[in-house]
Image (tube, grey):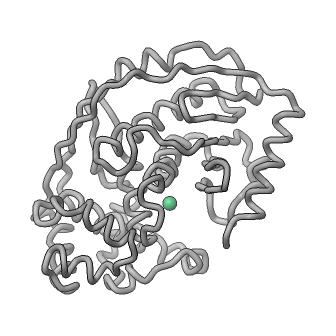
Amino acid sequence: MTERRYVKLVIFAVQLAACLSQGTLAVAGEWVRVESGSVELITDVSSKTRHDLLSRAELVRGTLAAMQMGPQTPSRPLRIIAFRSEEEYATHRAHIVASAYYLSSSDRDYIVLGGRESRFGDELQHEYTHYFIHQKFSSLPIWLDEGLAVLVSTVDHRRNQVRLGRMPVENSKFLANHGLTHSLSALFAFDYAERNQKSASVLAGFYSEAWLLTHMLCFSPNYAERFLEFMTAVNDGATADRAIAILWGKRLQDVKQDLHEYLDGQNISNMKVKISSSPLAKIATQRLSATTSSAIMRDLSLKLQKRPT
Ligand SMILES: [Zn+2]
């Protein structure tokens, strides 16, 4: 199994914790609007979960900004809606299997969370990665978009340091049991319409392999230096095969061989990134009337109806 080494980033965890401790009085079950910088959180979850979500959004923003995968501060307004009740969420699902999703619209972007509250943090990190990266790379192929989101879904911080690169438990189990189940050509050809028609097992293979390939391109010394150029090339319309040939002089079978070796733990490496400290936005919390929260839900329903399929 892949050797686990962690990228260590400098972070402002103490500053963050101090900021997030600022007052919020509403209790679980009461709908509130929490605003912090460009993030607006609409929710009826507990104060503890609200703080966790804002903390994780800031962690992902700082990490991805340090990796030059988007602007220091996202410009598109973001509304996160977190439903405490799965019944309420059920009427706002993007599609049947999703317990969380990211949605872009003309006036703002949305992240909607509605599965188990204990999973909200990891899901927020995944969906916030889509939101953040789309500010700079709005046309990535799905395998890379999802590979990055899974990669960043496990970023965390301890004792003022950030760890990036941990393998998610589900993907770890899948790769240990099944290995690499997709050809790279099949991985590159995956699209959103196809994603919604695939079985859970095929999707697990897709997400696991997308994660592994993204991890290798992002961290392996053989690839990492030109990873941002690769992202730019495929975002601008180049095929992954062509971009790989031009940037790294490799054929797909060479990359597949590298990926097998990477999975076996022969070539894992670390990437060092520094996150610069910056003042954190203040947090403002406001209770919402039933009329306002209903209007927000109607707005979400409208955006869901208009979304591209
Ligand atoms: Zn995703």
Foreground pick, 226 / 166: 226
Rendered residue at 18%/85% (across/down): 251
Foreground pick, 209 / 248: 248
Looking at the image, is 275 positioned above or below residue 227?
above
Rendered residue at 32%/65% (across/down): 231
**Horizontal side, residue 297 vs residue 203: left or right:** right
**Quadrant holding the N terminus:** bottom left
Rendered residue at 67%/42% (across/down): 81
Foreground pick, 133 / 262: 133
Rendered residue at 75%/54% (across/down): 92
Looking at the image, is 217 positioned above or below residue 274?
below
Q: Residue 99, image x and y in percent?
A: 62, 55
Q: Residue 124, image x and y in percent?
A: 52, 45
Single out the residue that lies furthest toward the right: 291
Q: Residue 41, image x and y in percent?
A: 63, 34
**Horizontal side, residue 118 vs residue 296: left or right:** left
**Horizontal side, residue 136 vs residue 161: left or right:** right
State which quadrant residue 95 falls in.
bottom right
Q: Residue 157, image x and y in percent?
A: 32, 33
**Quadrant holding the C terminus:** bottom right
Count of all numbered marks drawn on residues in the image: 0
State which quadrant residue 146 falls in.
bottom left
Looking at the image, is 261 positioned above or below residue 58?
below
State which quadrant residue 213 falls in.
bottom left
